[in-house]
Image (cartoon, helix red, strand yellow):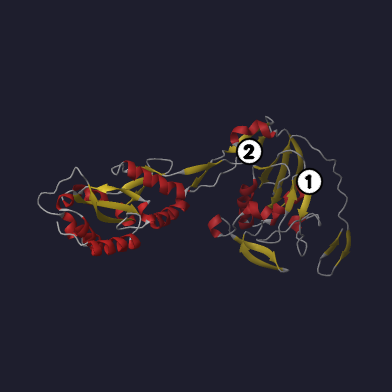
Amino acid sequence: MKKYPRYSFLLSLIVMILLGNNSFVLGKNLEKNKVTFLETDNIQETLEKPFYLFSVDKDETIPFYLKNFISWDYRIIYDPEYYAEIENIFLNNENNLIQAAYLDLNQGYEDKLHFKKNSNIYLLEKEIKKFLNSLSEKINKKPTNARFTMDKENKQVKVLKKSQTGIKFEVDKSFEKIKTSLQENIRNYYIPLVVSKNNPKINSNKIAEYQLEKLIGSGKSDFNGSSYTRIHNIKTAAKKFDGLLLEPEEEFSFIAALGKVNETTGYKEELVIKKNQTVPEFGGGICQLSTTIFRAILNTGMKITERHNHSYPVHYYDPPGTDATVYIPQPDLKFKNNTGNYVLLQTAIDEEDNKFYVEFYSKEDPFDVELIGPEVTEKTPKGNYEQH
């Protein structure tokens, strides 16, 4: 066999510099995500047939086409068990002429007969993670706190709405799961994604632990004269608050609990007080709820951390001085549950008597409350009050 030592050395040096680490074709980033060798007769089937990803329920699958997320190549490898009697396959290595030249100059005839092509596929990590991130909105679920109601006749707390465990989609871990599943079995067409559970703070199975035993305060307001749409908005908003359980030392925000107020969340246009004017907007009448909650807070004795009165008196909120205006994002109504116990907020509406009620239930009533005032010290020609 004729040898070319000088050229052989130079080509060897070039190969090591350009390719390194005995990887003739691909760099380390792809190499670490190599899935498997592909046999010629199953390449088309593997690439065309979808895999199915699922998170919690195997009946709810997401199609995943491997052909969209891979790079693939063939490489020449030395296999002493392989013997090519017809052709030296490495001589037709269009992908890497440097490798072909290197092998041609450095391998004897008998050695060349043990080289063969093998195809490899490599997962494109960035592209797969981008695809997985697009699934997050569909898979992720926030934990839902339980809601409770006090059965006044039986004096017993019941579950109004069960709690639900949240799900967090783990993108990085799911990519690794896909890779290992394919590496273990390229024909494993069902691949589980990785999710973690987020437990709710208020669990419907722990109702006894919250010790909701007695009424500790209440508020009442009169919406007599309200239109149908105003009553509708009051009832719609009340559903957001009915059954909420406040943890000890939790600061309650009316705006946060209320959420979005628009047509899509069930509200209708009605008059609201905005910048000293009465204008129609979605959710007009919600202040009936904030005012009633404010009165329940006063009667309970919990610490008020933010409260604003309306810019002028409205008969729905008589007596003056006991109202609380809210508007997204400000002003807000906030208070702190400083009772040392869990507190249940419960709402009720009496459409026959046009009365709205808010009640607080807890283990015990820790405060003695005495309300003094408000007193009207001055009344302007426009009907505004100076309140104390």
Q: Amino acid under label 2?
A: Phe
The residue wearing badge 2 is 148
Residue 74 image-quadrant placement: bottom left
Residue 149 image-quadrant placement: top right
Q: Residue at left 19%, top 51%?
A: 116
Q: Which mark is residue 147?
A: none
Q: Secondary structure at mark 1?
A: loop
Q: Residue at left 17%, top 53%?
A: 108
Q: Secondary structure at mark 2?
A: strand
For the view shown, which residue lies furthest in the top direction?
154
For the view shown, which residue lies furthest in the left direction?
86
Q: Amino acid under label 1?
A: Met
| Coordinates of residue 250 in the picture (x, y in percent) | 71, 46
- Image quadrant for the N terminus? bottom left
- Is 111 in front, or is 209? 111
| Coordinates of residue 152 in the picture (x, y in percent) | 69, 34
Number of the front mark, 1 or 2: 1
